[in-house]
Image: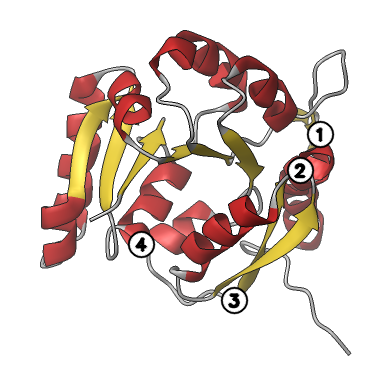
Amino acid sequence: MEKIGFVGGTGDLGRAIAIHLAKHYEILVGSRSIEKAEETVSTILREKPGKDYLQENLRSAENRNVVESCKIIFLTVPHENAIETIRSLVSNFLGGQILISAVAPVVKVGKEFHSKFDSSGKSVSQQIAELIPKSIKVATAFQSVPAHILYEERPISADVLVACDELETYRIVSELISKIEGLRPLYLGTLDLSGEIERLTALVLNIAIKNKLKSPTPKFNSF
């Protein structure tokens, strides 16, 4: 069975994606601390009783073990820690992997949410691509999916925008997205457009607050 890993898999979004993909893949839930990873897996199994695939396919690991052993890796850490986390793991990557960044650089200013990028104006995904070995393909996705809806396994109908430089990378990422019922992958374009996806989180949060909407998420219709 193919193995998929989560760097920072103990957070809300990492756990939410992991429980769905565990139906089809072996999942490593990673953390800087193995104790925290073990606690997260134990919590999931306690909150999701009777699901044999979770018992069989969810494993805890340190982040470095995730990047040393998985061909597909999700980065689901808070944006404040994303670059530092990747820097600490650069020497552990296998090479030839796919890294899916779900990082959303969002800060709250007063009563509104804003996207926050560094002085270069580059997206988090672009910064990551500059740090890791060139053989690793970076994709951006999942910034606008409500984690709690996925984790609670409530019905959802949402589009997941993906930015990456190669169509083969998109094919693999879109296949993963399609494994989660109710999610549809849509290709936005190259990694140069990854910032547009990362900005979606602030957009969705502001729409929710200003219009009193619960867990809105983009869905694109064609007429």
Compute the Cα span from label 4 to label 2: 25 Å
**Quadrant hosting residue 51:** bottom left
Q: Are marks 2 and 3 in contact (CB under 8 Å)?
A: no
**190 with respect to 37 (left or right):** right
Q: Relative to the observer, which residue lies in front, 41 or 127? A: 127
Q: Amino acid at mark 2?
A: Ala
* Residue highlighted by disc 1: 114
Tell me which residue sits at (35%, 35%) in the image: 10
**What number is the disc on residue 157?**
3
**What number is the disc on residue 202?**
2
Q: Secondary structure at mark 3?
A: loop
**Quadrant hosting residue 31:** top left
Q: Quadrant of the C terminus?
A: bottom right
Q: Quadrant of the N terminus?
A: bottom left
Compute the Cα span from label 2 to label 1: 6 Å
Compute the Cα span from label 3 to label 1: 25 Å
**208 with respect to 73 (left or right):** right
Q: Secondary structure at mark 4?
A: helix
**74 with respect to 170 (left or right):** left
